[in-house]
Amino acid sequence: MRITCVGGGPAGLYFGVLAKLADPDNEITVLERNPAGVTWGWGVVFWDDLLDDLFRYDPVSAERIWQSAYKWDEYQVRATGKPVTHLAGYGFSLGRHRLLEILAERATELGVRIEYEREISEVPEADLVVACDGARSRIREQHAEHFGAEVEVAANKYIWLGTRHVFETFTFGFEKTEAGWIWFHAYPFDDTTSTFIVECRPSTWTALGFDRLDARSGCEKLREIFAEHLDGKELIDHRAEVGGTGWLNFRRVTAHRWDHGNVVLMGDSAHTTHFAIGSGTKLAMQDAMALADAVASGDDLAVALERYEHRRKAALAPLQRAARASSAWFERVPDYADLPAKRFSYALSNRRGEYPMWRYLLHMATQSPVPRTVLRWTLSARRASRARRRPDTTPSSVAVPHTA
């Protein structure tokens, strides 16, 4: 089968890997508009469920991702006028550039052809065209009426930045300014760099002057606001290099149909989920797994694509509900800001509204050092045990060299 993936992000590259593993005779081409090694974005986050899937589908690339991942073992919550509190949980992060490097290397090893600096204005000729060209997909827009994509624009303003300050773990920080509350979601993804996402209400954004500041001036103002958290390090907006600024309103994309003839949507071209639950990369790669399974089934292409769509929509539904609840909570941050520190951080962790009472009791009990340490040890042991059960995981890969 001749397969062309339009878009060389994690979804397109990983689908190319899986489709080639399923049938080495498949002729697979990935078309990417950017030059090799160039990508917007900083780090991505993921959890055990994605790692389990990656090792099940392709242990080779999974092992490389695991070895490169930064491991963090709790969430920290900081807010103006409140003591620091902590949330239980662990996860993994990886630079987007490094993830794409791993997937491109693996795809090339298997015989997938990757063509960089390829702008696509029309649907290419192939037996199957996979549109994984992002939330503003050109391929989807060529058949906009058929795919029926709806776009909701969230109220808050946000910007995706980087910093050379390495946070100890995943950190939420809330600062009260004269214009209102502004906050960040930050996490380390290698030994020298962290992702730093800033969010605020539009009224705060305007009152602080971000509607009038260019990227460099805006980053400097944010550095001043969050100086207590950055240890003197600057904030970096890649778009400053091209004269733009990265401030956006999140666009929630939902396509009602995902396939049209031999064209199928995957990743952000089919759906987006708010960054507050950190699942964009995970969902894109799981789309690739489901599509690869469907195509390899031997069924008629139309039947296979329909099965893929139904499977993924069913899996996405609870996460989309969680993402909506999470983004809505952040739009109401001032409503919670006067809560005592422990209750504020619990409200943040329970923003989806799904935790039983024992989670609240555990949260309150583990804010003191001894029970918090015991909980961290317990979760670290669980992470190591789960890692040992994965296929082809060497003993050395069980170590957690980046854990704070």
Image (cartoon, rainbow, N blue to C red):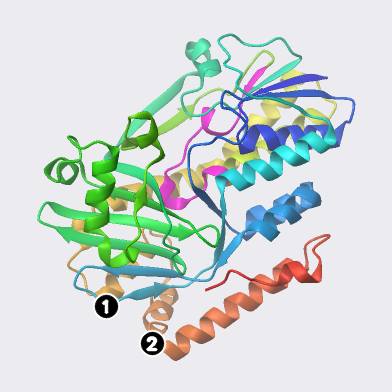
The N terminus lies in quadrant: top right
Name the residue type under label 2. Answer: Ser
The residue under the point 69% across, 15% down is 262
**Residue closer to the observer: 233 or 335:** 233
Tell me residue 378's x, y (percent): 59, 81
Q: Residue furthest left?
A: 178
Q: Which quarter of the picture shows residue 260?
A: top right
Q: Which quarter of the picture shows residue 17?
A: top right
Tell me residue 19's x, y (percent): 79, 32
Q: Which residue is mark 1?
A: 83
**Residue closer to the observer: 219 or 325:** 219
Q: Residue furthest bottom?
A: 370
Question: SS for tag 1?
Answer: loop
Tell me residue 126's x, y (percent): 74, 13
- Are there few (<14), some (14-19), or many (20+) residues within 10 Å of tag 2? few
Q: Nearer the viewer, mark 1 or mark 2?
A: 1
The residue under the point 20% across, 63% down is 337
Tell me residue 292's x, y (percent): 75, 34
The residue under the point 36% across, 58% down is 351
Query: CA gap, disc 1 to disc 2?
Result: 12 Å
Q: Which quarter of the picture shows residue 190?
A: bottom right
**Residue closer to the observer: 358 or 78:** 78
Question: SS for tag 2?
Answer: loop
Boundaries of the magenta span: 263-281
